[in-house]
Amino acid sequence: MIENQIARWKEIYHEYPKDFWVLIGVSFIDQLGGALLFPFFALYITAKFNVGMVEVGILFALFSLSNFVGSILGGALTDRFGRKQVVIFSLVATSISSVFMGLANELEAFYVIAALAGVLSVGGPARQAMVADILPEKKRAQGFGVLRVSANLSVAIGPAIGGLLLGVTSYLTLFIIDALASTIVAILFALVIRETKPETAEGEEEESVSQSFGGYLTVLKDSFFMLFVGACILMGLVYVNLNASLGVYLRDEFTVTEAGYGMLLSLNALMVVLFQFAITRRVENRPPMLVMAAGMLLYAIGFGLYGFVSTTAMFILAMIILTIGEMLIAPVSQALVATFSPEKMRGRYMAVFGISWMVPFAVGPYLAGLVMDNMDSRILWYIAGGIGILATFSFLWLHGKMKPAPSDIEIEVLA
């Protein structure tokens, strides 16, 4: 199995240009820095400030809303001024805010810094647009898949390292490492990454800043795309519990340590790295909305299972089930966004798709906190399973409404 994966990676390496692999490499460094820290935010907040999950939910809401504002700014600025400068600014700004978050001793100050960090996180749409810029159309979906595998490789390594480091050092060290990783990547972007924004055609006027922001109205009027975003919001409300609630639930109910929780997250990411290719090869020619529905059904089963089980073996089984669902959903969803978006509006479509994560992170952890702090914690996982079923039917409905796609719109996912 491993030998086959290595051989497959060698084939993939030669299919893509050097610029793409440079982008993947430097992004991996930044993702690894964040993966050391982000999964432990809920644990950090509850322990550092002696608060419950409601306060954690408020933090995630602030960060999510401000991050969405940053994404909207970044999407328009990316389409107007280019990708490279937007990414560099975001990396430098968020590295500084990471250090200040680690130094904050008051919860209110932490809230303010986290919100500011979210607004300054303008680089996400720019990186996604760079993948689409560098690769030809038939390779873009696979390219997004490779970017995702890179991110999951960082998550496979990061939480385990972060959990081990927390056994011998403080959370502040993790904040500093995250900041250093972002700073290094900003330098690498400045030195080795070229600008990829498509040049304006001869005789065509460049969009003004106001026109760039006004272009969001065009995206919002794309009704089928917005319905797809709505279904993805339901998906996100289920998935957000993986990083926002699961660690606290396992710690408080079953005394699972940070290192144990980190290992579960590493299992999730390692499965993606090892098996994403094989799974997507089997579904690449399937109707994309049906693939999304199948993945959501596995989400419903996997997340819902945590409300019924109490042993390490079953925790692992639940993680395996939901991760298979994730491997069905993630490449197809991003490929669909790339297909929906015109070339000149890639940044803005990617930014609006961020709603599907902004809403879940804004309200999901807070609502989960209300359940966990005031009811039997197992109820949270029953609710997650129910929302997963609702999302499954939503994607099935979208499949029925989706117009028959011509051959050039078939969704090609990572094989």
Image (tube, rainbow, N blue to C red):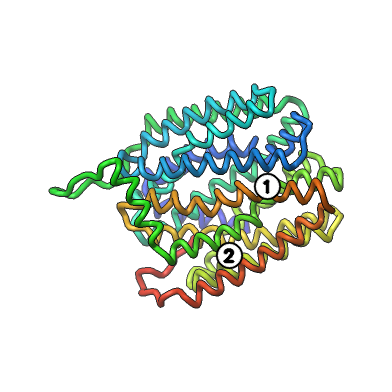
Residue nearest the viewer, comparing 379 with 181: 379
At label 1, the amino acid type is Pro
Residue nearest the viewer, comparing 109 with 26: 109
Task: Inspect this view and state whether residue 158 appears.
Answer: no
Q: Quadrant of residue 195?
A: top left
* Residue drawn at point x = 86 percent, y = 47 percent: 254
Residue 33 shows which numbered tag?
A: none
Q: Residue furthest left?
A: 203
* Residue 261 image point, x, y percent: 75, 44
Circle 2 or circle 1, nearest the eye: 1
Residue 365 shows which numbered tag?
A: 1
The reply, left or right, for residue 50 in relation to residue 326 is right
* Residue 211 image point, x, y percent: 28, 46
* Residue drawn at point x = 37 percent, y = 51 percent: 216
* Residue 223 image point, x, y percent: 42, 65
Q: CA distance from mark 2 to mark 1?
A: 30 Å
Of pointers 2 and 1, the one earlier in the residue sequence: 2
Residue named by callout 2: 279
- Rendered view: 57 above or below 310: above
